[in-house]
Image: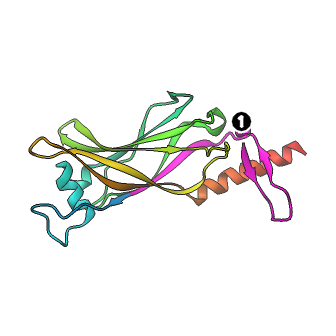
Amino acid sequence: SLGHAQDAAVAPLYFLSSDVALPVRLRVSEVRGTFPLGAGAAEDETFAQRFARHVGAASADVHVSCQLFSRGRPLCAAQRTGSTAGDSLRWLEWLSFPAAYRDLGPDAEVRISLFAPRGPGVAVCAGRAVLKLFNERGHLRVGQKELPMPLDAVDSDGAATQSSLLAHAASAQAEAEAVEAELQRVERALR
C-alpha cells in the first residue's frame, strides 16, 4: 500500500498500490566512488578515468541496464541508458518500464547492471546493484537513493578485482509528485 498524509493533524490515508496505474519509472543519475591510487595512476585522475582504466573501456562507452522484477520473475525486457557524454559516468536519464505500479508484488525490485564494452558488439558487466521498490512495511520507496555497487573487473593479468562505488539511481521528486497526484485522484474517486 502507499501512504499519503495531507497535513500533520490528519491521520495518514493509505491506498493499495493496485489502484496506481502510473508506469514504473527510474532516473539513473551517475556512478561515483573511489579507487585506491594504483600503479600508473596520476593523483589528479578523476573517478571516471580510474574506472575506465580499471575496466579497460572508455567511460564514454559505459551504459546502465535496468530490469524490473516482481514475484521472482522479470516483468519486461531490460531498459538501458545511452552511453555517457564525455569523460564522466553521468546519465541523468529517465528509464520507463512497460509495467504499472499496480502490476508489482511486494518483492518488486530493479536489478541494475553497469556494462563496459570490450570490443565491437561485446560488453561485460562491470558491477551490479539491486533497488527494492517497497520497504519492509510494503510502502513504495520514493526519492533519491544511493546504492552500493561492487565493481567486478578483471585486471590485465587475469586476476579478479573488486572495488566499491555508488550507483546514484533516483526516482526523483517529479516521480513522487506524479504518485501523489494519482493518490489524490483515487482518494476523490473513493469519496
In the picture, residue 126 is in which quadrant?
A: top left
Magenta range is: 1-30
151 lies left or right of 45? right
> Which residue is rendered at x = 71% and y = 36% of the image?
18
Q: Residue placed farthest to the right in the image? A: 191
Residue 36 in the image, given as x and y percentages of width and height: 22, 62
Quarter of the image holding residue 134? Answer: top right
Residue under the image location 57 percent in, 44 percent down: 133
60 versus 66 height, above or below: below
Answer with the quarter of the image where residue 49 lies.
bottom left
Residue at (59, 60) in percent of width and height: 173
* SS for dot 1: helix
Residue 121 vs residue 107: left or right? left
Which residue was labeled with disc 1? 18
Q: Residues within 10 Å of mark 1 (few under 14, many from 20)?
A: some
Give the side of residue 60 with respect to residue 19, left or right.
left
Residue 57 or residue 127, whichever sits in front: 127
* Image coords of residue 146 (percent x, y): 46, 56
Q: Residue 9 appears at what percent x and percent y? A: 86, 65
**Where 101 sits versus 11, above or below?**
above
Does residue 38 show up magenta in the picture? Answer: no
